[in-house]
């Protein structure tokens, strides 16, 4: 059985390259993932996520890995910076995609609530009431106008009835 799982196909090339480099560093060190975790202060579960491309390692973990393995930290941190930018772009694309899905679902739900468009085109509804333009309310609810005060009910600031 291979030591590492295959990296996800959808992984950004910069992140894939960085993750592969981390794997090579760990392989060359001869350390197990558990040993790397013990020596760096980051959990074994976290290192498994970092090394399988499911989570971008924090910069501190990369510096700690470099110290533990005797690797040049400058090279790893430069690669980390590039991967971090790619990770941020990937998250932004994911966020925008999720937002588009939510909007699409909301539109579909609203169109279901509104029901099918009425056929005919006679300009009247069931019961003979005419279709009136106006302010749209929730689906299926006609907008209502609150009762307006009469002239005898209007008072000025002093409390006197205005005529």
Image (cartoon, rainbow, N blue to C red):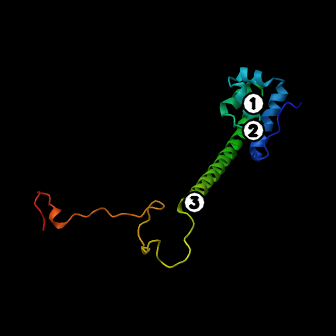
Percent coordinates x, y for residue 86 in the rendering: 69, 46
- Residue 133 is drawn in which quadrant? bottom left
Residue 152, above or below 82: below
Q: Secondary structure at mark 3?
A: helix
**Number of residues whose C-alpha sits closer than 10 Å to that of mark 1, classed few (under 14), some (14–19) or many (20 or more):** some
CB under 8 Å between callouts 2 and 3? no
- Residue 31 is drawn in which quadrant? top right
Residue 78, above or below 161: above
**Number of residues whose C-alpha sits closer than 10 Å to that of mark 2, classed few (under 14), some (14–19) or many (20 or more):** many
Mark toward the start of the polypeptide (2 vs 3)? 2
Seen at 11% across and 57% down, the residue is 159
Percent coordinates x, y for residue 95 in the rendering: 62, 49
Percent coordinates x, y for residue 70 in the rendering: 78, 26
Mark toward the start of the polypeptide (3 vs 1)? 1
Residue 74, above or below 12: above
Seen at 71% across and 42% down, the residue is 83
Q: Secondary structure at mark 2?
A: loop
Q: Mark 1 highlights which residue?
A: 48
Q: Mark 2 highlights which residue?
A: 53
The reply, left or right, for residue 137 in relation to residue 85 is left
Q: Mark 3 highlights which residue?
A: 112
């Amino acid at each position: 059985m291979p030591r590492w799982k295959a990296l996800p196909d959808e992984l950004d090339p910069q992140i894939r390259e960085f993750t592969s480099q981390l794997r090579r560093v760990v392989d060359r060190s001869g350390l197990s993932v558990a040993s790397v975790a013990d020596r760096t202060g980051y959990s074994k579960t976290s290192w498994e996520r970092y090394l399988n491309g499911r989570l971008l390692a924090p910069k501190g973990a990369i510096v700690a890995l470099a110290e533990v393995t005797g690797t040049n930290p400058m090279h790893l941190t430069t690669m980390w910076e590039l991967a971090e930018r790619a990770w941020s772009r990937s998250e932004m694309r994911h966020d925008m995609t999720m937002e588009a899905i939510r909007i699409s679902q909301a539109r579909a739900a609203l169109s279901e609530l509104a029901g099918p468009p009425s056929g005919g085109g006679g300009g009247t509804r069931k019961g003979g009431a005419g279709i009136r333009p106006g302010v749209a309310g929730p689906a299926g609810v006609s907008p209502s106008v609150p009762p307006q005060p009469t002239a005898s009910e209007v008072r000025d600031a002093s409390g006197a009835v205005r005529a």
